[in-house]
Every structure is written in structure tokens, then in C-alpha cells.
Image (tube, rainbow, N blue to C red):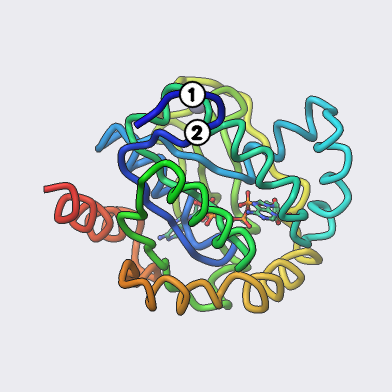
Amino acid sequence: MSAAGDTMTASAVYILLGPPGAGKGTQARMLQDKFGLVQLSTGDLLRAAVKAGTPAGKQAKAVMEEGGLVSDEIVLAILKDRLAEPDVQRGVILDGFPRTTGQAEALDRLLAEAGQKIDAAVSLEVEDAAMVTRISGRYTCAKCGEGYHDTFKQPARAGACDKCGGSDFTRRADDNAETVQTRLDAYHAQTAPLIAYYDRRGVLARVDAMGDIPAIATALGAIVQRISA
Ligand code: ADP
Ligand code: ADP
Ligand code: ZN
């Protein structure tokens, strides 16, 4: 394995596939804590670029607000930069990437160049009807990024983040009823075909994501444990 340039050096590569609101971020953070893997969310990276006002962020902003997908070119550039950082060597959970066949093929090329492979692509399977409820109740700790939900995941002490004690919470601009349908349409048209893509490569695992957060975490933990054993 090489640590040169933008070479990918992660020792384990897991992909979390699923529609917006499926629980990818929630589960990725739990896997990060439990297995020392690094969550890599292209949504978070893009939001950081928008906030910082970088050229990529400026291009991505309007598309994200409308609920469309940012171009493969921008997403790949942002992802490659992140993969060049040393902490990814512990292994990564790709959360929200890839989202198009073009991105999946680019990832295959990146991994092949580094002599690496995908350990598992896990599809979180949820009904569209649940998405609207999950997305419309979502909020996040502004300080540490821990995710919460108005109904399904409230902090143990009202108004204080369980993880860092922070009292400042944010809601995403795109988490509104208008964009949800656009985002679901983008998922079905452009991302759902990746389930068959990874099935053909023999790395697909399906997890029923209609259950509660701990039950899904147990199912995902078992997959990682089986593969890393
Ligand atoms: P994604 O990263 O796939 O968009 P999130 O992990 O942000 O999804 O979850 C969306 C919202 O739903 C959050 O508010 C989260 O707390 C909540 N949530 C996550 N998993 C579940 C679940 N299994 N049941 C109910 N709510 C959930
Ligand atoms: P969610 O899981 O709720 O859809 P994300 O945080 O993963 O939220 O993504 C938010 C937005 O960022 C998406 O609607 C899209 O505009 C953009 N985005 C994130 N990841 C990608 C990607 N891999 N390719 C294209 N656009 C992306
Ligand atoms: Zn916090």
C-alpha cells in the first residue's frame, strides 16, 4: 500500500447504500465508534464546501438546495481529497457515495489502482413512505454532527447533545417536503441501480432498515464482524 499523493490507502472499504433518510449517517457513525472505521459522507463534505464558499461549493449549492445530484466530477474531486488524508487508513464507510454508476466505476478504478477492494456494499432497505417522516424530523448537533430525530432519536437530556453536551442544533436547508420527492426520484433513477451493480460483483448485503436504530446497528455490526474476522 502506498501513501503517496491522492492514492487511496484505506484497509477496509464499506459502502452504505440507501435513499435519503434511510439511516446511513446514523449507522455510519455507530460503525465508526464501534469498529474504528472512518465515516466518509459526501453530503457532509459538500455541505462543508458550500459553507466554506470554495469553487466546488459554489457550484454544488443550488443543486443541493433543489434536491438534485451534484456532478460526478465535483463529488469525485472532493472524495479523492478526503481519501488522501492519513486517517482513512483505518478503513472507511462510504456514506452517500457512490450515487451514480459513473461514481461506482470511478471508485472501482481508484481501488484497483491501490490494489484494494470493496469489503461490502450494504443496502439499507426502507419504504419511501418512511423517508418523509425521517427526513422532516431530522436535526443535528452543530458542534459534533451527531444526528437526532424529533420522534425517533431524542437526546437523553432535552436540549443537550448526548455526545458532546452541545446545545446548538441545526436543520438542513434541503430537509423539507418540497425537495424530498426530488431526492427520492434521484435515488430511484440514479442510485438504486447500484444495488444490482454490487450484487453482480458479489459484495452486496441487504439490511431491512425499517426497524429501530439499535436493531439495524446489530445487523450491520454482524456483517462487519463476519467480514473482518
Ligand atoms: P441518511 O444519512 O440515510 O440520510 P440519517 O442517518 O440522517 O439518514 O437518518 C435520517 C433521520 O432519521 C435522522 O433524524 C435519524 O435520527 C432518523 N433515523 C435513522 N435511523 C432510523 C430508524 N431506524 N428509525 C427511525 N428513525 C431513524
Ligand atoms: P441524504 O442521505 O439525506 O440524501 P446527503 O447528505 O447524503 O443526504 O446528501 C445531501 C445532498 O448532497 C444530496 O441531495 C446531493 O445534492 C448531494 N450529494 C451528496 N452525495 C452525493 C453524491 N455522491 N453524488 C452527487 N450528489 C451528492
Ligand atoms: Zn454534539
The disc label shown at residue 71, or none: none
Q: Is residue 4 above or below residue 39?
A: above
Give the side of residue 168 with respect to residue 152, left or right.
right
The yes-or-no answer for disc 2 within 8 Å of ligand 2 is: no
Q: Is residue 184 above or below residue 229?
A: below
**Residue 183 appearing in the image:** yes
Label 1: few (<14), some (14–19) or many (≥20) C-alpha neighbours in 10 Å: few
Nearest the eye: 83 or 181: 83
Q: To which residue does mark 1 refer?
A: 4
Residue 96, percent from left and from top: 56, 54
Q: Amino acid at mark 1?
A: Ala
Residue 21 position by quadrant:
bottom right
Q: Amino acid at mark 2?
A: Thr
Q: Is residue 32 above or below residue 23?
A: above
- The residue at the point 63 percent across, 25 percent down is 168
CB of mark 1 within 8 Å of CB of mark 2?
Answer: yes
Label 2: few (<14), some (14–19) or many (≥20) C-alpha neighbours in 10 Å: some
Q: To which residue does mark 2 refer?
A: 7
Task: Give SS at disc 1.
Answer: loop
Total of numbered circles in the picture? Answer: 2
Residue 6 position by quadrant:
top right
